[in-house]
Image (cartoon, rainbow, N blue to C red):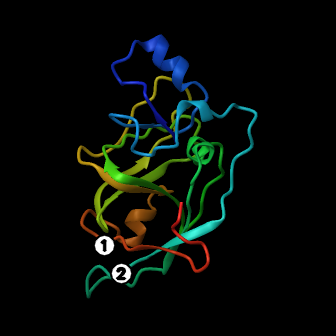
Amino acid sequence: MTATPVHPSAPLPAALSALRGLMAVLLVGPVGATGAARAGAEPTPQHAPQFLPLEAEWCLEQPAPAAPPPAGCIQLEVPRSARQLALGLMERSPLGPLRGMWFRFDPPAPVSFWMHRIRQPLDLIYLRQGRVIAIDAAVPPCPRLPCPSYGPVEPADGVVELQAHEAQRLGIVVGSPASLRWLQGTGAGS
Protein backbone atom coordinates (compact mmCIF):
# COMPACT_ATOMS: atom_id res chain seq x y z
CA MET A 1 0.00 0.00 0.00
CA THR A 2 1.21 3.50 -0.70
CA ALA A 3 -0.03 7.03 -1.11
CA THR A 4 0.45 8.41 -4.57
CA PRO A 5 -0.29 11.72 -6.27
CA VAL A 6 -1.77 9.90 -9.27
CA HIS A 7 -5.38 10.95 -9.64
CA PRO A 8 -7.91 8.29 -10.72
CA SER A 9 -8.75 10.37 -13.79
CA ALA A 10 -5.10 10.61 -14.93
CA PRO A 11 -4.40 9.30 -18.43
CA LEU A 12 -4.12 5.51 -18.32
CA PRO A 13 -0.46 5.22 -19.47
CA ALA A 14 0.67 7.78 -16.88
CA ALA A 15 -1.33 6.12 -14.13
CA LEU A 16 -0.04 2.64 -15.01
CA SER A 17 3.52 3.89 -15.10
CA ALA A 18 3.18 5.49 -11.67
CA LEU A 19 1.44 2.47 -10.17
CA ARG A 20 3.59 -0.28 -11.75
CA GLY A 21 4.77 -2.92 -9.31
CA LEU A 22 2.45 -2.07 -6.43
CA MET A 23 0.28 -4.66 -4.72
CA ALA A 24 -2.12 -2.45 -2.83
CA VAL A 25 -2.34 1.28 -3.30
CA LEU A 26 -3.83 4.06 -1.29
CA LEU A 27 -5.16 6.90 -3.39
CA VAL A 28 -5.77 10.06 -1.41
CA GLY A 29 -6.92 13.50 -2.44
CA PRO A 30 -4.08 15.81 -1.52
CA VAL A 31 -1.03 13.71 -0.67
CA GLY A 32 -0.45 13.93 3.02
CA ALA A 33 -2.85 11.40 4.49
CA THR A 34 0.10 9.11 5.15
CA GLY A 35 2.78 11.77 4.83
CA ALA A 36 5.83 9.60 4.16
CA ALA A 37 4.31 7.06 1.79
CA ARG A 38 5.08 8.15 -1.79
CA ALA A 39 5.49 6.54 -5.19
CA GLY A 40 9.29 6.61 -4.73
CA ALA A 41 9.13 3.58 -2.42
CA GLU A 42 7.71 1.41 -5.18
CA PRO A 43 8.53 -2.28 -4.75
CA THR A 44 9.73 -4.42 -7.60
CA PRO A 45 8.71 -8.02 -8.33
CA GLN A 46 11.96 -9.49 -7.01
CA HIS A 47 11.29 -8.23 -3.46
CA ALA A 48 10.40 -10.88 -0.92
CA PRO A 49 7.21 -10.37 1.07
CA GLN A 50 7.61 -8.40 4.27
CA PHE A 51 6.81 -9.77 7.69
CA LEU A 52 6.61 -6.98 10.26
CA PRO A 53 6.69 -7.47 14.02
CA LEU A 54 3.37 -7.67 15.84
CA GLU A 55 3.03 -4.24 17.42
CA ALA A 56 -0.68 -3.78 18.13
CA GLU A 57 -3.84 -5.71 18.84
CA TRP A 58 -7.59 -5.35 18.47
CA CYS A 59 -9.36 -7.13 21.32
CA LEU A 60 -12.95 -7.82 20.33
CA GLU A 61 -15.96 -7.12 22.46
CA GLN A 62 -18.88 -9.53 22.55
CA PRO A 63 -21.41 -8.05 20.07
CA ALA A 64 -24.65 -9.24 21.71
CA PRO A 65 -25.70 -11.41 24.69
CA ALA A 66 -26.84 -14.27 22.42
CA ALA A 67 -23.68 -14.23 20.29
CA PRO A 68 -20.72 -16.49 21.02
CA PRO A 69 -17.74 -14.71 22.55
CA PRO A 70 -15.06 -13.58 20.10
CA ALA A 71 -11.97 -15.74 19.83
CA GLY A 72 -9.71 -13.16 21.46
CA CYS A 73 -7.47 -10.44 20.09
CA ILE A 74 -6.38 -9.83 16.51
CA GLN A 75 -2.59 -9.44 16.42
CA LEU A 76 -1.53 -6.66 14.06
CA GLU A 77 1.52 -5.76 12.04
CA VAL A 78 1.85 -1.98 11.61
CA PRO A 79 3.69 -0.56 8.58
CA ARG A 80 5.49 2.64 9.58
CA SER A 81 7.84 3.63 6.77
CA ALA A 82 7.07 4.54 3.17
CA ARG A 83 8.66 1.28 2.04
CA GLN A 84 6.60 -0.80 4.48
CA LEU A 85 3.41 0.96 3.35
CA ALA A 86 4.31 0.32 -0.30
CA LEU A 87 4.92 -3.40 0.29
CA GLY A 88 1.89 -3.96 2.56
CA LEU A 89 0.75 -7.58 2.14
CA MET A 90 2.32 -7.98 -1.31
CA GLU A 91 3.05 -11.60 -2.21
CA ARG A 92 2.19 -12.79 1.32
CA SER A 93 0.75 -16.21 2.01
CA PRO A 94 -2.62 -16.24 3.86
CA LEU A 95 -2.54 -14.42 7.17
CA GLY A 96 -4.46 -16.98 9.22
CA PRO A 97 -7.01 -16.39 11.97
CA LEU A 98 -6.58 -13.46 14.33
CA ARG A 99 -3.75 -11.91 12.26
CA GLY A 100 -3.82 -8.69 10.27
CA MET A 101 -2.17 -5.46 9.21
CA TRP A 102 -3.20 -2.02 10.51
CA PHE A 103 -2.69 1.03 8.28
CA ARG A 104 -2.98 4.33 10.21
CA PHE A 105 -3.95 7.76 8.82
CA ASP A 106 -3.44 10.97 10.76
CA PRO A 107 -5.34 13.09 10.01
CA PRO A 108 -8.27 10.97 8.77
CA ALA A 109 -8.54 10.93 4.96
CA PRO A 110 -10.61 9.39 2.17
CA VAL A 111 -8.88 6.09 1.33
CA SER A 112 -9.07 3.68 -1.56
CA PHE A 113 -7.32 0.31 -1.88
CA TRP A 114 -6.67 -2.02 -4.78
CA MET A 115 -5.55 -5.66 -4.69
CA HIS A 116 -2.79 -5.84 -7.29
CA ARG A 117 -0.24 -8.58 -6.40
CA ILE A 118 -2.18 -9.80 -3.35
CA ARG A 119 -2.21 -13.61 -3.20
CA GLN A 120 -5.47 -14.17 -1.30
CA PRO A 121 -8.80 -12.37 -0.80
CA LEU A 122 -8.88 -9.96 2.13
CA ASP A 123 -11.43 -8.27 4.35
CA LEU A 124 -10.78 -4.50 4.42
CA ILE A 125 -12.15 -2.93 7.61
CA TYR A 126 -12.26 0.87 7.66
CA LEU A 127 -12.10 2.67 11.01
CA ARG A 128 -12.74 6.13 12.38
CA GLN A 129 -12.69 7.32 15.99
CA GLY A 130 -12.71 3.81 17.47
CA ARG A 131 -15.56 2.40 15.36
CA VAL A 132 -15.91 0.37 12.16
CA ILE A 133 -17.32 2.70 9.48
CA ALA A 134 -17.29 0.29 6.50
CA ILE A 135 -16.21 -3.21 5.48
CA ASP A 136 -15.28 -4.57 2.06
CA ALA A 137 -15.52 -8.33 2.60
CA ALA A 138 -13.54 -10.97 0.71
CA VAL A 139 -12.03 -8.50 -1.77
CA PRO A 140 -10.50 -10.65 -4.54
CA PRO A 141 -6.88 -10.39 -5.72
CA CYS A 142 -6.26 -8.57 -8.99
CA PRO A 143 -3.65 -10.43 -11.09
CA ARG A 144 -3.23 -7.73 -13.77
CA LEU A 145 -3.96 -4.08 -14.32
CA PRO A 146 -6.30 -2.30 -14.38
CA CYS A 147 -7.64 -3.19 -10.94
CA PRO A 148 -10.77 -1.89 -9.21
CA SER A 149 -10.39 0.14 -6.05
CA TYR A 150 -12.31 -0.19 -2.78
CA GLY A 151 -13.04 2.19 0.06
CA PRO A 152 -15.71 4.18 1.89
CA VAL A 153 -16.90 7.63 0.93
CA GLU A 154 -16.13 9.10 4.35
CA PRO A 155 -12.59 9.64 5.70
CA ALA A 156 -10.94 6.89 7.74
CA ASP A 157 -8.22 7.05 10.37
CA GLY A 158 -7.30 3.39 9.95
CA VAL A 159 -7.76 0.28 7.86
CA VAL A 160 -7.30 -3.26 9.12
CA GLU A 161 -6.69 -6.00 6.56
CA LEU A 162 -7.64 -9.56 7.57
CA GLN A 163 -7.93 -12.83 5.66
CA ALA A 164 -11.25 -13.14 3.82
CA HIS A 165 -14.34 -13.89 5.94
CA GLU A 166 -12.49 -13.23 9.20
CA ALA A 167 -14.60 -10.13 9.97
CA GLN A 168 -17.82 -12.16 9.63
CA ARG A 169 -16.39 -15.06 11.67
CA LEU A 170 -15.47 -12.66 14.47
CA GLY A 171 -18.78 -10.77 14.37
CA ILE A 172 -17.22 -7.49 13.20
CA VAL A 173 -19.87 -5.30 11.55
CA VAL A 174 -20.29 -1.61 10.70
CA GLY A 175 -20.63 0.16 14.05
CA SER A 176 -18.52 -2.38 15.98
CA PRO A 177 -16.11 -0.86 18.49
CA ALA A 178 -12.53 -0.88 17.27
CA SER A 179 -10.28 -0.33 20.25
CA LEU A 180 -6.85 -0.94 18.80
CA ARG A 181 -3.94 -0.64 21.20
CA TRP A 182 -0.19 -0.83 21.07
CA LEU A 183 1.45 -3.87 22.60
CA GLN A 184 3.60 -3.21 25.62
CA GLY A 185 7.02 -1.88 24.66
CA THR A 186 6.21 -1.02 21.03
CA GLY A 187 4.90 2.53 21.47
CA ALA A 188 2.81 4.69 19.18
CA GLY A 189 5.56 7.22 18.54
CA SER A 190 5.86 6.84 14.79
Amino acid carrying mark 2 in the image: Glu
Compared across the picture, whether 4 is left or right of 63 comes to: right
Q: Position of residue 125 (x, y in %)?
A: 38, 57
110 above or below 55?
above
Residue occupied by mark 1: 177
Residue farthest to the bottom? 65
Compared across the picture, whether 6 is left or right of 17 comes to: left
Residue occupied by mark 2: 61
Name the residue at 58% across, 24% down.
20
Q: Nearer the viewer, residue 173 or 43?
A: 43
Q: Position of residue 98 (x, y in %)?
A: 53, 70
Quarter where residue 184 is shown:
bottom right
Amino acid carrying mark 1 in the image: Pro
Name the residue at 24% across, 66% down.
175
Quarter where residue 151 is shown:
top left
Instruction: Compare marks 2 and 1 and give the one earlier in the sequence.
Output: 2
| Marks 2,1: beta carbons within 8 A | yes
Name the residue at 61% across, 48% down.
84
Is the C terminus in the top left, top right, bottom left or bottom right quadrant? bottom right
Q: Position of residue 177 (x, y in %)?
A: 30, 72
